Amino acid sequence: MVIAPTTRPWFERDDWHVVAAERGLTPRERALVDTFRTEGFVVVEDGRVLDELDVDGIWTSLEDRFAPDGAGRVQDAWRELPAVRSIATHPAVLDVLRLLYEREPIPFQTLNFRSGTEQQTHSDTIHFSSIPSGFMCGVWMALEDVTLRQGPLHYFPTSQRLPEFDYEDLGIPPVEGDRTWENPKTLASYLVYEQRIAALAREGGFRREELAIAKGTFLVWSANLLHGGSPRDDRTLTRKSQVSHYYFAGAVPFTPMFSRARDGRYDVRRLQDIRTGRWVTPSIDGAPLLFPGEPDGLREIARAGGLAGALSRAVGTDRGLPRSAGEALAWGARALARHLRS
Ligand SMILES: O=C(O)CCC(=O)C(=O)O
């Protein structure tokens, strides 16, 4: 049985304020949720976030990983730098995400930028979507004071209400071959995607905003908000920042640009939770799943019933994405044995 998408985030409901009242949200919390649901982003000032963190050490450690003019990005420096990990997992950030989504956030990727990215406008949903959809967001943290002269983040408020466009929706042929950026076809398709999205942002009548922001302040964008990096007016200026990406518990992560969603075949992502370093076993609202398909190929998504399901829910399947009940059972049994021995 293939799984049908279920619920979207609660804040999108018309009666969200009733739910907010039931949850006992304070006026400040309600205002935060209201801005997020309406605009697709929210800016949060919280003096605690960078306290006691060696932020300068991030740039010293990563210095030779950026171009001489500061361009470039370092992905997943959380593996080596505690300060990067602490920013992605800071309780002040996670608490806001729990408030907004009412699900447990799973920090899974960090990007550090020394200077403005000048990245073309895009929606994160071409890289990161979920089943059910809507359970992914980005957090953009200023690691120095940022003015509009430093190639700031730009975004189009309310654009998150557009449909989540994948390549098929936009008339872009699927990427053939390796599902990596080393495959030249990946970039070729992505460049067409950027042109299509730029036209949508222009023609959709959205206002364009740029972010001037104080160090330690962060912006949360919802998965489908159109955003990117503005041109750097002065290439001598830095724009130190960190983007951390999050999924939420109970949703299956996948990469739309490599998936064939209409055929029910997905490039399912395996997530490593930055908090624990552990691989996350994907589920839909706690229901254990199977992912039939070739080991390194696109996968279908189906419910895992019976003992295989119960076992994989109880102990997880950190070996990967089980393709069959037999695989889930064998991996689950091994994980259980390991757990009992330890
Ligand atoms: O920081 C920026 O300039 C853009 C970052 C961005 O678009 C992203 O990480 O998805």
Image (cartoon, grey):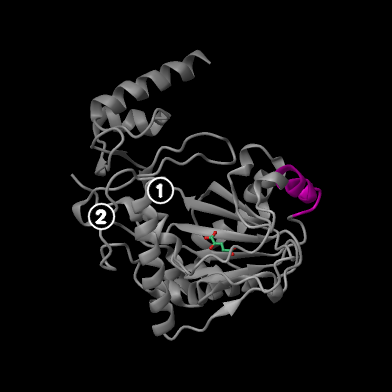
Q: Residue at x 76, y 67 (%)?
A: 145
Front position in the image: 302 or 85: 85
Front position in the image: 44 or 299: 299
Q: Residue furthest front?
A: 68
Q: Name which residue type carries label 1.
A: Gly
Q: Residue at x 66, y 60 (%)?
A: 141
Quarter holding the N terminus is top left
Q: Is residue 177 above or below residue 8?
A: above
Q: Distance from label 1 to label 2 (Cα)?
A: 19 Å
Q: Position of residue 128 (x, y in %)?
A: 42, 54
Image quadrant assignment for residue 329: top left
- Residue 318 colored magenta? no
Span colored in magenta? 50-62
Q: Is residue 248 above or below residue 291?
A: below
Q: State the residue position of label 1.
A: 250
Closest to the camera, between mark 1 and mark 2, is 2
178 relative to 44 in the view: left or right: left
Front position in the image: 100 or 41: 41
Q: State the residue position of label 2.
A: 261
Query: Does residue 131 appear anywhere in the picture?
Result: no
SS type, badge 2: helix
Q: Position of residue 272 (x, y in %)?
A: 50, 39
